[in-house]
Image: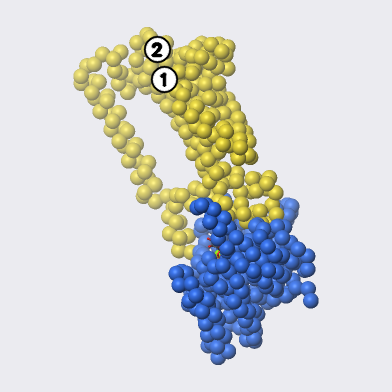
Chain colours: A blue, B yellow
Amino acid sequence: MIYKLEVRHVKKTFATRQEGEIVTALQDVSLSIRDGEFVSIVGPSGCGKSTLLDMIAGLSVPDDGDILLNGTSIVSEKGHVSYMPQKDSLFPWRTILDNVIVPLQVQGVRKKEARQEALALLPDFGLEQFADHYPFMLSGGMRQRASFLRTYLQKKDVMLLDEPFASLDALTRMKMQEWLMKMWQTFQHAVLLVTHSVDEALLLSDRIYVFSPRPGRVLTEISVDIPRPRAARTSADPSFTSLKKELLHWLEDGISHEAPVRKKQIP
Amino acid sequence: MKNWRNTVKKRGPGSEGWQAFLLPLSVFLLLITIWQLFVNLSGIEEWLLPGPIAIIEALWGNRDLMWYHSVQTLSETLVGLAIAVAVGVLIATVIESSELLRKSFYPLLVATQTVPIVAVAPLLFIWLSYGFTHKVFVVALVCFFPVTISLADGYRMVDRDMVRYMTSMGASPVQIFRMVKLPAALPSFFSGLRIAATYSVMGAVIGEMIGASRGLGIFLIRASQSYLTDRVFAIIVVITLLSLSIYAFVEILARVMMPWYHKQKDPA
Ligand SMILES: Nc1ncnc2c1ncn2[C@@H]1O[C@H](COP(=O)(O)OP(=O)(O)OP(=O)(O)O)[C@@H](O)[C@H]1O
Ligand SMILES: [Mg+2]
């Protein structure tokens, strides 16, 4: 069958500045996402998750392997997927409304029409009161929503989200997860989410790929068969707890092979 | 759902705003009074040090001459500043478009900035005709470097992640320039323009001192040669006011063009 997005045996190395030492960020990674599927990647810091998303978005080129969208290679091609990078880069000189229309303007839509289109979407994203605010006036959660709306307005049916909630406090994070779930059920995009949080991955995903520490490889793939709609309460569910145990086992096992790897945000 | 920072920032023009204005004004008035008292009590010769009242009288008594020369100086200043901005923006932008150009020209730009303008001005007098042009040129020259260098630096300060984000959406270099680099460079550009604004009147006055028939610079030279010290002070006051108003104009322009920057900087 043809997947929505397929990553085949991708490898990526970086030459570091010091004495031409070569760092292998990703070593033979393969994964696939079906149309409308929600897939997560969990893995320790530095295992190449952002590197992988960059390559899917066409920002860098794999040393080896292929990346296919609807069965055609998109290696080094930009603009095929909606990408929300790890760092929130809203433009400080634009209001929230004018920030979220950036992708439309890039596609050549006139400012006036772009604004009209975005204005209609602001309530869905809980941003209607903030249209004229500048990003620095908003809380972290609201900024993430704006980033997300901006990503959504790239209007591609595959979304790459790189740790969208990492900088939020636990409560805001939980709200944003539920909100993202609702959004995804309405819009039915294929989503590839990178996260450090096992709970987040279990709550949101259909499937989870667990990555090893650097050099990144797929350790295992876990299907999350917990019925939807899920909520934060789901984490008390027995199937949730057993899946969580399994995931943590894989992560810890992966880490214990290489002792000095930083353990960051893995609950 | 409003963020606490929003509410804290909405303070309005409270007591602090007035203090910022009233305190320096009182100190200024106090100093002027002391000056006047000193002149009255010490009986110092007027040609050596006139008091503030004598200066104001000289200012008012010569108001037609002051106006006549100020118009000349102001027009030289504005034309020179406009040329500096136009050429500076062009050059900084061209340099930014290529790594090679940047590497070749940027260090030279910084180095030439250290040449003292006062020393170059007589040369310009020889090269350019006696009249409007050489003074405009001096102004353009002193203003050119701060404008160009600050804009070139501003382009460099753009957040690489923003550029990457634009690239990932398939934005063209022109779109990236217009939507990211240019707005990102504005704060730095305006700090250069502020420096240029304070230099600009000085440039025109120096140009006029070296050779002119009209303008505050030559007016100043003539007054000092006749030991009309109260008039010299009056001209200094006018020059300062001109500088201040150009600076204020730049400041207003900055606020109009970067509302986001000023809202963020000063919680007003
Ligand atoms: N441009 C680059 N040049 C050199 N090394 C790089 C470059 N980009 C990434 N790396 C290295 O590749 C490895 C993977 O980086 P990446 O940012 O993909 O990790 P990550 O899994 O996203 O980590 P985190 O969870 O902390 O975001 C890291 O060791 C990093 O130092
Ligand atoms: Mg990352």
Q: Is residue B46 left or right of residue B75?
A: left
Instruction: Specify few, some or many for label 2: CA neighbours under 10 Å numbering under 14, 14-19, or 20 or more.
Output: some
Q: Is residue B109 above or below residue B213?
A: below
Q: Amino acid at mark 2?
A: Ala
At x 36%, y 49%, the residue is B15
Q: In the structure shown, which secondary structural element does the residue marked by tag 1 occupy? A: helix
Q: In the structure shown, which secondary structural element does the residue marked by tag 2 occupy? A: helix
Q: Where does residue A240 sit, x and y in percent of width and height?
A: 56, 86
Pick whichever of labels 2 and 1 is earlier in the sequence.
2
Outermost residue, left side: B42
Query: Label 1 near label 2: C-beta < 8 Å?
Result: yes
Q: Where does residue A180 sit, x and y in percent of width and height?
A: 61, 73
At x 70%, y 49%, the residue is B172
Q: What residue sits right under mark 2 in the picture? A: B223
Q: Where does residue B77 sit, x and y in percent of width and height?
A: 53, 24
Q: What residue sits right under mark 1 in the picture? A: B235
In the image, B45 versus A48, the foreground residue is A48
Chain of the residue on which disc 2 is drawn? B
In the image, A58 versus A201, the foreground residue is A58
At x 42%, y 13%, the residue is B221
Q: Is residue B231 above or below residue B141?
A: above
In the image, B205 versus A34, the foreground residue is A34
Ligand 1 falls in quadrant: bottom right
Q: Is residue A154 above or below residue B224?
A: below
Q: Amino acid at mark 1?
A: Ile
In the picture, residue A47 is in which quadrant?
A: bottom right
Q: Which mark is residue B187?
A: none
